[in-house]
Amino acid sequence: MSSALAIAGVTQLMRDLLNDGLVDHDVAAVVNTNVPVHALPPDQMLAQEENNAPALNVFLYHSEVNGAWANQGLPTRNSDGQRVSNTPLALDLYYLVSAYGTADLHNDVLLGYAMQILHEHPGFTRSEIQTALNPSPAIAAGLPPLLQALANTGLADQAEALRIAPHPLPVGEMSSLWSALQSQYRPSMTYRVSTVIIQSNAPTHNVLPVLTIGENDSGPMVIATLAPDSPLIRRVITPALQSSARVNDVFDVEGVEMGGANPRFSLSHLHPSLNIEHTVMAQAGGDARGQSMQVPNVPAVWASGTYSLLFHHDVAGSAQTSNQLTVQIAPVLTLPPLNMVRAASSITVTIRVSPHLHPGQQATLWLGSEGVSAQEITTATDTLTFVFSALAAGNYPVRIRVDGVDSWFIERDRPPIAPDFTPRPPIYDPTQIVVVPA
């Protein structure tokens, strides 16, 4: 997700896009002078025009909440006023692109090129955002502090891509807009950039989950089936009744028509900025109705989170691929923590986690019901640091969530005990405890 600097970052991206386009089209040769691109209020651009310097201006005149994203997250605070979620703020930004010049046809030339550039470039790729806002150290050193700060917008890592689309206004609305700006009208066009997703990393309060609802919390599963011609996977069965698997765990995949040669699974991490893909051979002993896979114990090349899962096998020398399901790989904490230091008003926890955390991933550590985000990392690492506000001394259940997947902190698979073999409810894992010192 992006930071509060994202709005300024998008404006700078628009400036860079137009400036690069003017250079590529050699517009300076057409108007016989260099053409700067500004991001100023239109009334301040009049002084630029009085200096006989043609210019383009990109002005953010309106922003609004994106309706499609508005209800995606939980409320930020509960009824007690405690922060329980960092709800994303999704915005569409509206820009006024105007041409300024005093010579004949300069306004028309500049607006024409600006509209062509934005028409041919209807969005920004992640690599373009990274290059524009986070240049090499040699270039960044010569930039003003504000432009250097835009390297931390997070726009390149947000889930939604940035798209540029024309947003033409009727003549009456355009006239009203320029009147509200209290500036003289200049040839212009309006555009919408969507969607900027701003999200905080503030600490959150997250209560422990309910373990059971009533007795024997179970129900029937009814699946209508037709035998397909290619493999069809229906269900991923993770170990110990958990919702995820860990590195070195074995999980089962049920389906039909899975009995071909060379059975194998392909997994691809769903994080937009991670390029983590693996192909793992199925374990021996599988058949047409199910196969098993062991997650390789190589934590440095895996990442916690949600993966897409495909099954492949060979039939008569031809490879066949199944439908896609998802499987979650859970993080595992090494306890006790490497270090826990109490200061006057905070507690710093340094702890190891497997698999490694990669840049761009979000990690939150909870001690009891108090959670904080990990300190920023720049390279993949298995050592994370968390800074909590003052906590009372004592024993706290501990869990970590990486990209929405929690570490195992509940024992769910508890076999019944003789002689009556009464089902036993889940309990919190007694090994997942951290002692906060006084």
Image (cartoon, rainbow, N blue to C red):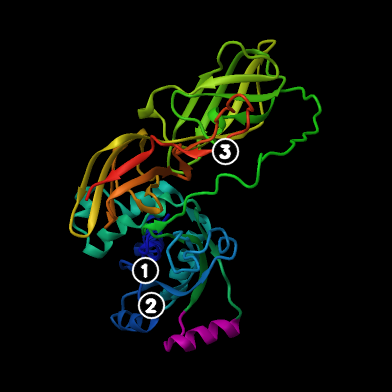
Expressed as whole percent of the image width and height from the top left, the position of residue 131 reads 34, 49
Q: Residues within 10 Å of mark 2 (few under 14, many from 20)?
A: many
In percent of the image, x 50 and y 68: which residue is there? 79
Confirm or deny contact between disc 2 and disc 1 (CB under 8 A).
Answer: yes
- Image: 54 above or below 215: below
Circle 2 sits on which residue?
101
In percent of the image, x 48 and y 77: which residue is there? 187
Q: Residues within 10 Å of mark 1 (few under 14, many from 20)?
A: some
Mark 1: amino acid = Val
**Foreground disc of the pair 3, 1:** 3
Question: Residue 301: which disc?
Answer: none
Mark 2: amino acid = Gly
Give the main secondary structure of the magenta stretch. Answer: helix
**Foreground disc of the pair 3, 2:** 3
- Residues in magenta, as a range: 171-186
Mark 3: amino acid = Pro
Circle 3 sits on which residue?
425
